[in-house]
Amino acid sequence: MAYILAKLLFPALDNLTFYAKVAELINEQKRFCIATVVKTIGHTSGKLGSKAIILEDGRGFFGWVGGGCVETTVLHEAIKTIKEGRSRTIYLEMEDELRGTGVPCGGSMEVYLEPVLPKKELVLVGHGGIVESLAKIGKLLDYRVVVADPDGMFKDPSSVDLYITDPDLRGVEISSNTAVVVSTMHKLDHKYLKLALDGGARYIGLIASSKRAGIVFETLLRIGVPEESLRRISSPAGLDIGAEKPEEIALSVFAEIIALEKGGTGKRLAEVKAIEKELKEIVSDSTAERVGPVC
């Protein structure tokens, strides 16, 4: 009975309907996860290749990967996957009611969870060499690049996805999918940073001298921004790579953005990755002599 009810609530979708739904959600800039059954052992209601779409709020579930608690488990794990932004494979055991999903069907299955997220967005406030270089790197890395330049001095507006000169940044939407970098030395810098904080931007950077940053932070405190919120603002923005030129500073800022998004340490890879050197001895075919160790 539970199996029949689940099939009625979450019917399988044919390929055309399934991918049409995927396209629809992408066009709507929705965050969702595609769950695909990639392996089954024994008796399972979901079959190899069965697919489902799960929305980030958990209320939308389109398709079919299995009945009963399988759907519940996949739904919860899919929501986690969307939040983490990383694909993974989960193992569902249905042979044991206590150790598995709670459905003793006598089988097991593996489900591949793939998050589908809107294109990441980079909002740059200001103009000049650093902003121009950040915009170029952003496009190279497939970000949606928005330049908000109250002074109207950005050299090539056509090179970015959106260019505005409104000092109030009307038309700019900031979310958890957005990285914001403020590089203006403008009297409204505190306002731009507050917009980024209020919008929940995943990264907020301020390119300014220590003195200038101190003034901006004091202003934010005076207008009621909690001190703990100021810790979300990276200033000076970027990682310490000895950058001097605008292009180098832009590279250090983007390195920090990526490190934050991917969970990187910002250290040298040689420090965080264990290097296992395997030396092999090569014997000459002609002389049968040991040539020496090589990597």
Image: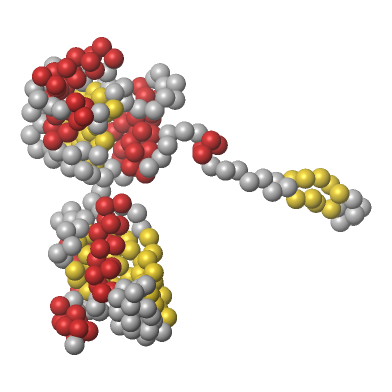
Residue nearest the viewer, comparing 171 with 178: 178
Q: In the figure, 180 relative to 7: above or below?
A: above
x, y percent for residue 232: 25, 31
Residue that appears at 63% across and 46% down: 276
Residue nearest the viewer, comparing 182 with 228: 228
x, y percent for residue 48: 37, 78
Q: Quadrant of residue 65?
A: bottom left
Residue that appears at 44% across and 25% down: 241
Q: In the figure, 172 relative to 247: above or below?
A: below
x, y percent for residue 3: 22, 84
Residue nearest the viewer, comparing 27 with 178: 178
Q: Quadrant of residue 224?
A: top left
x, y percent for residue 64: 25, 76
Q: In the figure, 72 relative to 85: above or below?
A: below
The answer to whether residue 228 shows anywhere in this view is yes
Q: Quadrant of residue 107?
A: bottom left
Residue nearest the viewer, comparing 51 with 107: 107
The image quadrant where one finds the N terminus is: bottom left
Q: In the figure, 146 relative to 190: above or below?
A: below
Question: Most extreme residue toward the top, as rendered?
Answer: 211
